[in-house]
Image (cartoon, helix red, strand yellow):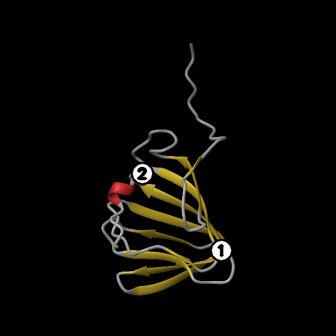
Amino acid sequence: MVSKKYLIQKSPFVVPTTDGKLIEEHHGNATTGNPEISIAHMIAPPKWSEPFQTPEFEEYTYIISGKKQFIIEGETIILKAGQSIKIEKNTRVQYSNPFDEPCEYIAICKPAFDFNKVHREE
């Protein structure tokens, strides 16, 4: 028997949310059991925001459409379509979309996203 050297993800895990944000994890803990990396497709609705957090993982974000705001250690940064960012682990950050259009993006976490390691503030 020959094992495949690849995995095509046809049914990502849709993370249940209460804030209108779409999170489709294609690879990571929830879908493939991979703790090393997670890759998710996301759509943040207009006027969406999350609490500040200090994750124990690096997060890379690539903006497909719209704009996304990041407050990183007190500095406000706005990315638009075609731009990307890497945020080091153990960095205090807030993600939001204070704009009037949805923001579609890809998020990659290394190691994989783990809700127990995101450390969201109350």
The secondary structure type at the circle numbered 2 is: loop
Tell me where residue 18 appears, x and y as whole percent.
54, 64
Label 2, label 1: how many angstroms apart (C-alpha)?
24 Å
Q: Residue at x 50, y 39 (%)?
A: 32
> Callout 2: few (<14), some (14-19), or many (20+) C-alpha neighbours within 10 Å?
many
Image quadrant in which you'd find residue 17: bottom right
Q: Which residue is mark 2?
A: 112
Labelled pair 2, 1 in contact (Cβ < 8 Å): no
Tell me where residue 111 appears, x and y as whole percent.
38, 52
Q: The residue under label 1 is which amino acid type? A: Ala
In the rendered view of the protein, which quadrant contains the N terminus? Answer: top right
Q: In the image, which disc is placed on residue 30?
A: none
Q: Nearer the viewer, residue 93 or 51?
A: 51
In the rendered view of the protein, which quadrant contains the C terminus? Answer: bottom left
Q: Nearer the viewer, residue 118 or 16?
A: 16
Q: The residue under label 2 is which amino acid type? A: Ala
Q: Nearer the viewer, residue 101 or 81?
A: 101
Q: Residue at x 39, y 53 (%)?
A: 114
Q: Is residue 94 left or right of residue 25?
A: left
Whether residue 19 is situated above or below residue 36 in the rendered picture: below
Total marks in image = 2
